[in-house]
Image (tube, coloured by chain):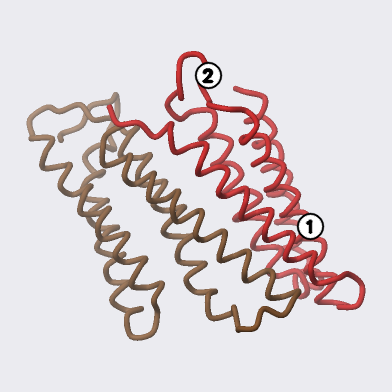
Chain colours: A red, B brown
């Protein structure tokens, strides 16, 4: 299993536990509902898919089986920075909007969107018909 | 992977990109004024990522990796149900994403996709890598 996949899968498991913990705490869930959902669908499910696809999809080439590393690493970083930023900023702003600036949410969304594009662009050449 | 799986997976990647970009707009709208109400995009965001990305990817990969030994039934027959599932799923996401009066038609089309996918895969869920398709 490539190192990047190990990072994806271990982080996914951390988000799974974090998401379920939030779900088990009704007072936290009341202000962190969207963050709870996204911890599970982005942090757990999507991240697990990214990691396993990076590992198991058909080889890009014999020399570079998984394609360029730079985009793949950037995808991992952007997805997690964006998600953590969202999970921290959104509930805090829902609780007390003056605590953190709203543009941080735009940054969080932009980072995750770039991660989605990065994954799609790096995976596309490995979707091969045979 | 089979051609139909490649189409499923590529379409799921397109939905992933579009769905994440729409999600970025939705999230940004919670923090900064955008000049319009992004909340109307929430339904299409959910539709594209839940059905267009996740469910579609699972279908494509399942069609790719499940056992496909042919014993006595023509493989083309099976491919037709897989292609039908692909067409119905993507039409369903489009219709349901447009919402309004098309929502029910979209949901019905997605159910048709799921049924066609189940018909395709049912016989391939078998022990020892043998199936009757």
| Chain at tag 1 | A
| Chain at tag 2 | A
**Which residue is rendered at x = 59% and y = 65% of the image?**
B23
Q: Secondary structure at mark 2?
A: loop
Instruction: State the residue in front, B57 or B67.
Output: B57
Residue A50 lies, with reference to residue B43, above or below; the image says above
**Marks 2 and 1 on same chain:** yes
**Which residue is rendered at x = 65% and y = 60% of the image?**
A38
Give the numbered dot on residue A28: none
Q: Secondary structure at mark 1?
A: helix
Q: Residue furthest right?
A: A99
Q: Residue furthest front?
A: B35
**Which is nearer the N-term, disc 2 or disc 1?**
2
**Which residue is rendered at x = 25% and y = 61% of the image?**
B88
Residue B26 lies, with reference to residue A121, above or below; the image says below
Give the numbered dot on residue A64: 2
Name the spot of residue A116 as percent of width and height, x first: 57, 50
Q: Report the side of B110 relative to A123 (left or right).
A: left
Name the spot of residue B121 as percent of width and height, x first: 26, 43
Q: Which residue is mark 1?
A: A85
Q: CA–CA distance between discs 2 and 1?
A: 33 Å
The quadrant in which residue A110 appears is: bottom right
Specify few, some or many for label 2: CA neighbours under 10 Å numbering under 14, 14-19, or 20 or more: few
Q: Residue furthest top?
A: A63
**Which residue is rendered at x = 42% and y = 50% of the image?**
B12
The quadrant in which residue A107 appears is: bottom right
């Amino acid at each position: 299993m490539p190192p990047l996949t190990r990072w994806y899968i271990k982080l996914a498991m951390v988000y799974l536990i974090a998401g379920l913990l939030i779900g088990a705490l009704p007072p936290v869930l009341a202000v962190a509902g969207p963050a709870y959902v996204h911890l599970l669908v982005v942090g757990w499910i999507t991240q697990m898919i990214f990691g396993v696809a990076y590992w198991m999809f058909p080889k890009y080439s014999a020399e570079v089986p998984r394609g360029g590393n730079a985009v793949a690493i950037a995808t991992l970083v952007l997805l997690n920075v964006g998600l953590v930023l969202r999970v921290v900023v959104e509930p805090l702003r829902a609780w007390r909007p003056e605590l953190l600036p709203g543009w941080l949410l735009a940054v969080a969304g932009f980072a995750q969107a770039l991660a989605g594009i990065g994954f799609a662009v790096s995976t596309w050449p490995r979707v091969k018909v045979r | 992977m089979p051609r139909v799986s490649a189409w499923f997976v590529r379409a799921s990647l397109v939905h992933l990109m579009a769905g994440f970009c729409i999600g970025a707009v939705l999230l940004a709208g919670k923090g900064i004024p955008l000049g319009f109400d992004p909340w109307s995009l929430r339904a299409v965001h959910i539709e594209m990522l839940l059905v267009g990305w996740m469910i579609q990817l699972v279908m494509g990969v399942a069609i790719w990796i499940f056992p496909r030994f042919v014993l006595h039934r023509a493989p083309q027959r099976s491919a037709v149900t897989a292609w039908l599932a692909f067409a119905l799923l993507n039409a369903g996401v489009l219709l349901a994403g447009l919402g309004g009066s098309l929502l029910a038609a979209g949901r019905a089309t997605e159910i048709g996709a799921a049924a066609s996918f189940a018909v395709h895969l049912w016989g391939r869920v078998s022990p020892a890598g043998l199936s009757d398709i």
